Amino acid sequence: MSSYDVIIIGSGPGGYVAAIRCAQLGMNTAIIEKYNTLGGTCLNVGCIPSKALLDSSEHFHNAAHSFSEHGIELTGLKANIKQMIQRKNDVVSQTCSGVKFLMDKNKIDVHTGVGSFVDKNTVKVTAADGTSNNINGKNIIIATGSKPNFFPGMEPDKKRIITSTEALNLQEIPKKMIVIGAGVIGLELGSVYGRLGTEIEVVEFSPTILPTMDASIGKEFAKILKKEGFKFQLEHRVQKVENKGKSVVLTALNKKGEEVTFEADYCLVAVGRKAYTDGLGLENVGLVANNRGQVEVNDHLQTVVPNIYAIGDVVRGAMLAHKAEEEGVFIAEQLAGQKPHMNYNLIPGVVYTWPEIAAVGKTEEELKAAGVEYKIGNFPIKALGRARASMDTAGFIKILADKTTDEVLGVHMIAARAADLIMEAVVAMEYRASAEDIARICHPHPTYSEGMKEAAMAATENRAMHI
Ligand code: FAD
Ligand code: NAI
């Protein structure tokens, strides 16, 4: 039986990054992945393919809607969905091969098959052909990730009632798509097809879109998306979704309790994801998934079995690739005897629509609930020269700072390039900067980053200059 210092089950961004860091720190490392390609949800059916399609559809949308104003004339513009999907597949396959290259470079053994616990130091790897072998590890990291969630009545049949995985592989541009859930997946993948001409109708349980973000974001972004043609059915309780052959029919109760129906070619179910531990044999080591399906861990990401750890989507916290990666590094360094640190308050969240949405730290609602006195600096993107030059004028940057100390407590933005802009806020907050610190930093002109400076000036003494 092969023996390792560390065995990692699952090769998503949590697992493969943990493996690299373990190997860098001199540990003899193995990774087990049930699929033939490495990279997990993120690389195969998550972050990378969705961003590839978002980028392609954004090019198309710009060509169709803003090129002419820029003085670029096109005739015969047409979206070729099959080519978009093919390019996306190529990007995925290159990225997954990159992970295999990194495993080889770091001398990490890759075992292909389903990993399941035999005992606390032994994992059985069962290949697709049914053959199996056992491997032994001093420490084992569970990094098995998550799967799409759904509720009774909306079970995906993966044909017309689909999850994000199928939505990333459609071979036609639907005429109409119902999206259940105005969260990150619903709005990103809704945007992909909306930009290609699909009519998007979002059915959401909450009274706002993106309900977990700062309330100002959902309010403003709903207006932006409505202009793009999105329809929102908020406060709707989905009863059932039926595949009618060439269409789907969704039945819901509206906020008055009346039954309403919506019909479309496809229904995308995007109501969250659930931790995945099927077939892992947790029971063989005395572990029990909690009622959310997650593996319970302490602050050291350690389960109740001292040599078994868990990271990423399968444990509590944001289901984000970069959170999983940081936890992978955290475990590896801890196993090497180091004292790593993770700041869960400063994990940025990004929605890759256009404009992009990004946030870090506390929302206004969280500060209110915690009784923290705060001040707000708000700056509209349309006041930036750069935004007018590029015709991306929608959105705002909002900085929340402590009323007494001026420390930045939260930053929330809708802006072109917000995904990159948010890092200024993350760095500032990691160093516990005040709003005035940001306001006094020289920002390059003309850039969107000037919006951060202006919002910081607005928070400092209400002295933003360009509004
Ligand atoms: P996963 O990536 O889910 O990987 C787990 C791996 O474990 C899988 O490969 C699985 O096959 C394997 N596995 C499971 N059980 C076993 C077993 N018993 N034996 C062997 N292997 C097993 N996050 C972002 O930060 N940014 C984004 O832009 C973003 N976009 C997304 C878009 C979509 C459509 C989706 C669905 C998700 C997106 N996410 C995004 C979330 C991100 O993909 C996850 O947070 C991330 O992949 C979690 O990493 P992980 O390592 O915990 O698990
Ligand atoms: P989500 O949690 O972001 O949104 C789910 C939405 O569905 C919420 O608005 C919720 O109120 C709504 N909802 C729940 N039950 C409902 C019901 N019965 N009827 C109608 N609406 C209902 O989950 P989503 O979009 O599925 O994404 C899952 C996770 O994947 C995200 O939480 C995120 O962690 C990750 N992800 C991250 C991305 C990014 O970082 N850009 C992109 C895509 C996914």
Image (tube, grey):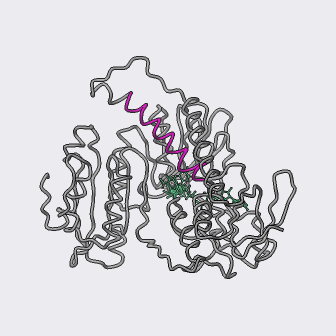
Image point 27% across, 67% down: which residue?
400
**Closest to the observer: 249 or 16?**
16
**Up/down of 334 relative to 76, above or below:** below
Q: Which residue lies furthest to the right in this view?
A: 131
Range covered by the magenta-colored residues: 41-63
Q: Is residue 265 left or right of residue 70?
A: right
| Quarter of the figure with residue 219 | bottom left
Q: Position of residue 390 (x, y in %)?
A: 27, 38
Q: Where is residue 70 in the image (x, y as percent from the top left)?
A: 27, 28
Q: Is residue 369 left or right of residue 298?
A: left
Does residue 364 appear in this view?
A: yes
Number of callouts? 0
**Up/down of 229 relative to 369, above or below:** above
Q: Where is residue 381 in the image (x, y as percent from the top left)?
A: 24, 49
**Closest to the observer: 53 or 429?**
429
Q: Where is residue 404 in the image (x, y as percent from the top left)?
A: 21, 78
Image point 12% across, 55% down: which residue?
465
Image point 43% across, 48% down: which residue?
352
Taken as a whole, is the magenta stretch helix, strand or loop? helix
Image point 80% across, 67% down: which residue?
2
| Quarter of the figure with residue 94 | top right
Q: Does the magenta stretch include residue 73?
A: no
**Closest to the observer: 261 or 455?**
455
